Amino acid sequence: MKKWNFLLLPLLALGVGFFSSFLVKDQIAAFAPLQAQIPLSPPSALFPVVWTILYILMGISLALVLYQQPSSSNAITIWVAQLAVNFFWSLLFFGKQWYLASFLWLILLWWLIVTMISVFYTFSPLAAKLQIPYLLWVTFAGYLNFATFLLSRA
């Protein structure tokens, strides 16, 4: 079962991400003009590529932890929590366009990622290091989210 985790967990994370984006796909397309006004905003086509990579890394990281410690309930709990918060951010930001609430939600996600990195490091330093791109991207997403909030108020 341990080796199957390296396939199943990335697929689970990808599935959660896909489902979240599917629920707001129309709103994502409508967001492009506002996104274009934000300095340093990457092209829209980059987002699904980056998120695909990050979801795969999320799954691989948990698989690495479970390979070392199959009964690590702390690692599983924090991984599920951050994935759930990640899922709902899209619904808040794109679906409801609650930009300030989604920014605060993103701060919670950022804290969960930092916590996940810390917990994962105790079992597998590699698993923790694989989450650094996720942390950096969510930090950048925080900038984009807050800039969107400011633009929407103007």
Image (spheres, grey):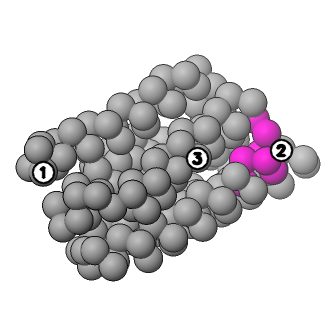
| Residue occupied by mark 1 | 2
C-beta proximity under 8 Å, tags 3 and 2? no
The answer to which image quadrant residue 146 occupies is bottom right
* Residue annotated with mark 2: 152
Residue at the image position 35 percent from the left and 70 percent from the top: 120
Please tell me how many numbered marks the rendered image carries: 3
10 Å crowding of disc 1: few (<14), some (14-19), many (20+):
few
**Is 76 situated left or right of 7 in this image?**
right
Residue 153 x/y as whole percent: 90, 47
* Residue type, label 3: Val
* Residue 98 part of the magenta-drawn span: yes
The magenta stretch spans which residues?
Answer: 97-103
Of the residues under marks 1 and 2, which one precedes in the sequence?
A: 1
- CA gap between label 1 and label 3 equals 26 Å
Please give left or right for residue 121 compared with residue 87 in the image.
left
Residue 25 x/y as whole percent? 53, 24
The residue sitting at 45% across, 66% down in the picture is 116
Q: Amino acid at mark 2?
A: Ser
Reply above or below: 19 against 103: above
State the mark number for residue 85: 3
Residue at x 18%, y 67% (from the top left corner): 68
Q: Report crowding for label 3: few under 14, some 14 to 19, many 20 or more residues within 10 A (C-alpha).
A: some
Pinpoint residue 127: horizontal percent, then vertical percent: 27, 68
